[in-house]
């Protein structure tokens, strides 16, 4: 049984694809309407939950040029440009359809100090993005493309786009902790599958050796995928950034809270994205995957569901010399 708030948000979510289509009535939508609805829902919910677009950078006076890597729907870049007309904001994304949609939104909103370009973050073009030309480089939720990003190489490229004294801001969410057996099993399956692909983000050389001796001997933290939030600050320091500081936000995603519906939707989409990886590890048949998905989503919507998600934003400064 759902709360009235959950049912209202479900109705709003289902209406978003239609509203997106209405923005382009003369032709097919340039994007996956359901995926775009998810991205917009995530943006507005998190913006309200953490207190704004850049709550961890209170002094914005010296920021004039901003690069948003992986801009997706363009909502963050457009909102920032709208709120700060003295800034020039550029969003980049490898998906041409998302870039086309973002450009539509900027034009419809009459925000003229924002631009969007098609760029693969693993193959950034210095002819389009001039080195040292941005006062702030923003990245968020790149872990959604976990298997498509080589983080150390990415950071080595990103550092060149910050101006001396410029800021790099990176935001990621840790895998939530919950009282749902289905969700915790899901998190453990992701952890095991990622370790098979050497994407576990753990450096303990004994891990694989212990794993062969039986999962019962492994520490819980090595079974369960927790995300990459624990790596962000060390990675920034490793590429030479200083004044690195963290901001952490604890988000209540329990049943009946303002963020619960958004969380269920994020899990729904993430499950389908990660399923090919899980299938290679667990050898799931399609009907088994569908059953586990339904069980997971049902469990998350139980009135006794409790969960907590930690959002981490790390900000570092590029040395002047």
Image: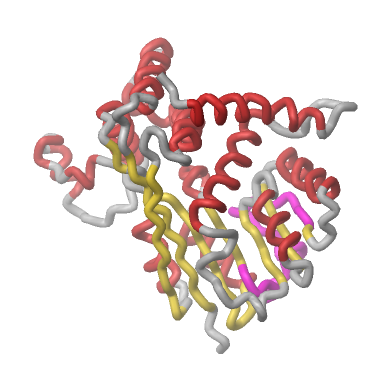
Q: Position of residue 270 (x, y in %)?
A: 47, 34
Q: How many marks?
A: 0
Q: Position of residue 218 (x, y in %)?
A: 14, 42
Which of 93/307 is in front? 307
The answer to which quarter of the image holds residue 247 is: bottom left
Q: Secondary structure of the magenta portion, mostly? A: loop
Q: Is residue 129 magenta?
A: yes
Q: Quadrant of the N terminus?
A: top left
Q: Is residue 79 magenta?
A: no
Bounds of the magenta span? 115-136
The answer, for residue 273, to whether it is visible in the render is no
- Left or right: 179 with respect to 253? left
Q: Position of residue 289 (x, y in %)?
A: 39, 18
The answer, for residue 83, to whether it is visible in the render is yes
Seen at 69% across and 28% down, the residue is 17
Seen at 55% across and 43% down, the residue is 42
Seen at 81% across and 29% down, the residue is 22
The answer to which quarter of the image holds residue 284 is: top left
Which of 94/307 is in front? 307
Q: Quadrant of the C terminus?
A: bottom right
Seen at 41% across and 57% down, the residue is 249
Residue 197 vertical position relative to residue 138 in the rendered view, above or below: above
């Amino acid at each position: 049984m759902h709360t009235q708030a959950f049912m209202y948000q479900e109705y709003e979510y289902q209406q978003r694809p239609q509203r997106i289509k209405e923005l382009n009535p003369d032709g097919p939508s340039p994007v996956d309407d359901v995926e775009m609805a998810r991205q917009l829902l995530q943006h507005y919910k998190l913006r309200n939950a953490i207190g704004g677009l850049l709550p961890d950078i209170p002094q914005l006076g010296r920021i004039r040029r901003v690069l948003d890597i992986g801009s997706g729907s363009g909502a963050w870049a457009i909102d920032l440009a709208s709120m700060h007309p003295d800034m020039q904001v550029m969003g980049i994304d490898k998906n041409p359809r998302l870039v086309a949609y973002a450009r539509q939104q900027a034009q419809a909103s009459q925000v003229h100090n924002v631009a969007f370009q098609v760029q693969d973050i693993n193959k950034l073009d210095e002819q389009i993005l001039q080195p040292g030309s941005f006062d702030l480089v923003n990245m968020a939720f790149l872990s959604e493309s976990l298997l498509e990003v080589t983080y150390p190489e990415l950071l080595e490229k990103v550092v060149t786009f910050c101006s001396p004294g410029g800021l790099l801001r990176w935001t990621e969410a840790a895998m939530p902790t919950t009282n749902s057996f289905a969700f915790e099993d899901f998190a453990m399956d992701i952890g095991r599958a990622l370790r098979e692909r050497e994407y576990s983000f753990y450096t303990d050389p004994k891990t694989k050796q212990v794993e062969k001796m039986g999962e019962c001997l492994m520490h819980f933290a090595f079974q369960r995928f927790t995300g990459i939030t624990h790596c962000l600050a060390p990675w920034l320091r490793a590429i030479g950034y200083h004044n690195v500081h963290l901001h952490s936000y604890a988000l209540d995603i329990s049943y009946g809270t303002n963020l619960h519906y958004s969380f269920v939707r994020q899990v729904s989409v993430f499950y389908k994205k990660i399923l090919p990886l899980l299938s290679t590890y667990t050898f799931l048949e399609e009907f088994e995957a569908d059953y586990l998905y339904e069980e997971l989503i049902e469990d998350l919507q139980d009135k006794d569901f409790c969960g907590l998600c930690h959002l981490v934003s790390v900000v570092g400064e590029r040395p002047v010399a």
